[in-house]
Image (spheres, helix red, strand yellow):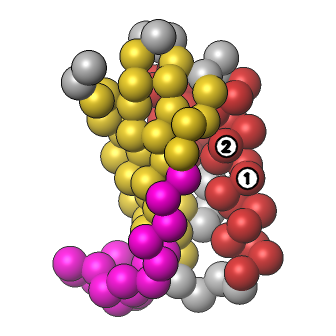
Amino acid sequence: MNKYEIALVLNSKIDDEARAATLERVTNRIAKSGSTVTDIDEKGKQRLAYEIQDMLEGYYYFVHFEGPDDAPAFIERHLRIYENVIRFLIVRQDA
């Protein structure tokens, strides 16, 4: 099992309930990939470095998980179609 981190930026125009539902969808997708979520670090609403889809702010989350080698590709395929996820990055963490 490898350790990974997902940096998520969620739409700042959605309410708390929709944001929690999106985060739950992401964690469910991680679980379906055969991985285990170890930590979710919420950074809150922050200014974006540049405008994305007419937004200047977004909610930042860092999700840490352990999973097999093919987990990032599986998760990435689904993150691309989630409408409230405006940016994401999956990186493998060194041991």
Q: Position of residue 85 (x, y in %)?
A: 53, 61
Q: Disc number at residue 27?
A: 2
Using residue 91 as the reference point, say whether residue 58 is left or right of it: right
Q: Residues within 10 Å of mark 1 (few under 14, many from 20)?
A: few
Q: Position of residue 77 (x, y in %)?
A: 53, 33
Secondary structure of the residue carrying tag 1 is helix
Residue 29 seen by the camera: yes
**How many numbered callouts?**
2
The kind of residue on which mark 2 rests is Thr
The kind of residue on which mark 1 rests is Glu
Using residue 2 as the reference point, say whether residue 39 is left or right of it: right
Q: Position of residue 81 (x, y in %)?
A: 59, 49
What residue is rendered at 52% in x and 18% in y?
67
What residue is rendered at 29% in x and 80% in y?
48
The C terminus sits in image quarter? top left
| Residue 18, picture quadrant | bottom right
Q: Are marks 2 and 1 in contact (CB under 8 Å)?
A: yes
Secondary structure of the residue carrying tag 2 is helix
Magenta-highlighted residues: 40-59
What residue is rendered at 72% in x and 25% in y?
32
As drawn, 68 above or below 80: above
| Residue 17, picture quadrant | bottom right
Front-most of residues 81 and 69: 69
Using residue 73 as the reference point, say whether residue 33 is left or right of it: right
Front-most of residues 43 and 14: 43
Residue 77 seen by the camera: no
Q: Is residue 9 magenta?
A: no
Q: Is residue 58 magenta?
A: yes
Q: Position of residue 5 (x, y in %)?
A: 39, 40
- The residue labelled by disc 1 is 24
